[in-house]
Amino acid sequence: MTMEAKSTKKVQLTSYRSSFRYLFVFSILKIFLYPLMWLLFNFRSYPYIEDSQDSNYIILSNHTGALDPLMLSLSFKRPIFFVASDHLFRLGFISKIIDFLVAPIPIVKSKLDLQALRIIRSELEIGNTVALFPSGSRSISGPEEPIPSATSKLLKLLNKPVLLYRLEGGYLTSPRWARSHRRGKMSGRVVHKLTVEDIKNHSYQELNEIVYEYLNADPYAAEEPNTTIFRGRNLAQYLERIVWHCPSCLRLGTVKSEKDIVFCDCGFRLRYDPTGYFQPAGNTSDEQDFALRFPHVDSLYQWQLAELKKNFSLKNLTAMNSHQPIFSDDEEILILTSRAEKNERVLHGSIALYPDRLEFSNQDKEVEYLFPLDKIHEVHCIGPQRLQFTDVRDKLVYESINENPRSAFKYIETIKQIKSQIPRN
């Protein structure tokens, strides 16, 4: 590429997100967003008061709900350009509307996306403000998801002040697994600022620890249980999106939900109450015991992860039948994605996880796609249950979706555990 072409490309980039359109749209949207966010979520935003040194900055926020970007933007006077999963750019006409109004920066979760990093750096250099959710994923069970170690490296590379923005009450308002949101109490504010000097003086590990400490809004971490009521309907519905292991009979994939009850046909039952905690679903001693063992969603989720480590140790994996699936689901749709452009549906059938591979079969039960686990790079969940992964053999990104409630996380966490036990060459 010639120097003239490079210069033209930079001008186009500058005019794209620096245009008056986004300042205008941002100002107009805020007029409607304030009452709408209060009406739906009882959300209060605390304005960030800029000081004389705030020529530009990058914003890092925790991630609890699909509308987090809208809520965060209410605390700022300037347009904010968010880094978003590239699936938003593969929705046809809807994607064009989103891009026209707010111009998010696409990033592919299941691969190292250098193109997205270059765009972020360029936008900051020309004076635009960028916000991202460093965990890259909405909270699954309450605590903020782990912050990748690369986050601190990115902050040092960008060399800009960093605002840490925390949303409180978001998980109990819009649980990732839930069918619908509930109205309780939410707020958002800048809780900490890292100057350029702070970023230079802290080690990579220290930076990551600081970011996580300020962004973690775990509703179950306080000494006193939450007492705020989060009103909604069918409060436990679709909890099976993240709960796949019954703690009573220990079977996999047998947990279901209905209204405010999560249950298994073996007799396991818990009631999810409006404060976000589990209560006994009845008066039996077993039901009382379940509620004592698992006071909230995260306690049940962490128990599952501990069971995974025991059940899929290297010793147990070696003894497993490679022809017997660990999990399987029907009515699965496999999609081949093209970065921030389009989806190509390549299969409608079933998904099955084995000790050494992930298989997709058509409706005639014929295996059409086989992915050895050691060839799968990073597995992520987009939204409540869209499974995304990259095949390292050809660098293609796939997504697997299902209209029925099923857990993507049972595949994600099990694959991670199995891969951690595979000896490296």
Image: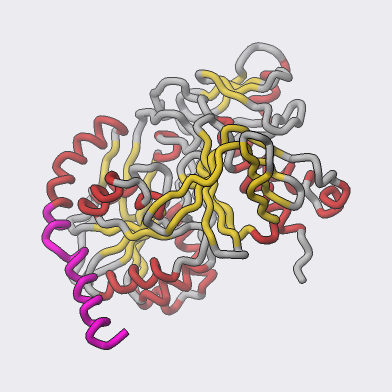
Q: Is residue 42 left or right of residue 245?
A: left
Q: Nearer the viewer, residue 4 or 39?
A: 4
Q: Count of labels shown?
A: 0
Residue at 37% x, 74% y: name it.
158
Q: Residue furthest bottom?
A: 3
Image location of residue 154, percent across then percent down: 43, 71
Any part of residue 141 in sight: no
In the picture shown, does residue 100 fall above or below 45? below
Any part of residue 328 in sight: yes
Q: Magenta residues: mostly which secondary structure?
A: helix
Q: Is residue 420 left or right of residue 177?
A: right
Residue at 60% x, 30% y: name it.
295
Image quadrant in which the C terminus is located: bottom right
Image location of residue 422, percent across then percent down: 76, 60
Image location of residue 279, percent across then percent down: 58, 22
Query: What colour scheme was applied to this rendering of the protein?
Result: secondary structure
Image location of residue 209, percent across then percent down: 51, 63
In the picture shown, does residue 162 fall above or below 263? below
In the picture shown, does residue 10 fall above or below 164? below
The answer to whether residue 14 is magenta is yes
Q: Nearer the viewer, residue 81 or 378?
A: 378
Q: Residue furthest top?
A: 283
In the picture shown, does residue 195 fall above or below 69? below
The answer to whether residue 6 is magenta is yes
Q: Which residues are magenta?
A: 1-24
Residue at 33% x, 60% y: name it.
105
Q: Is residue 404 left or right of residue 200?
A: right
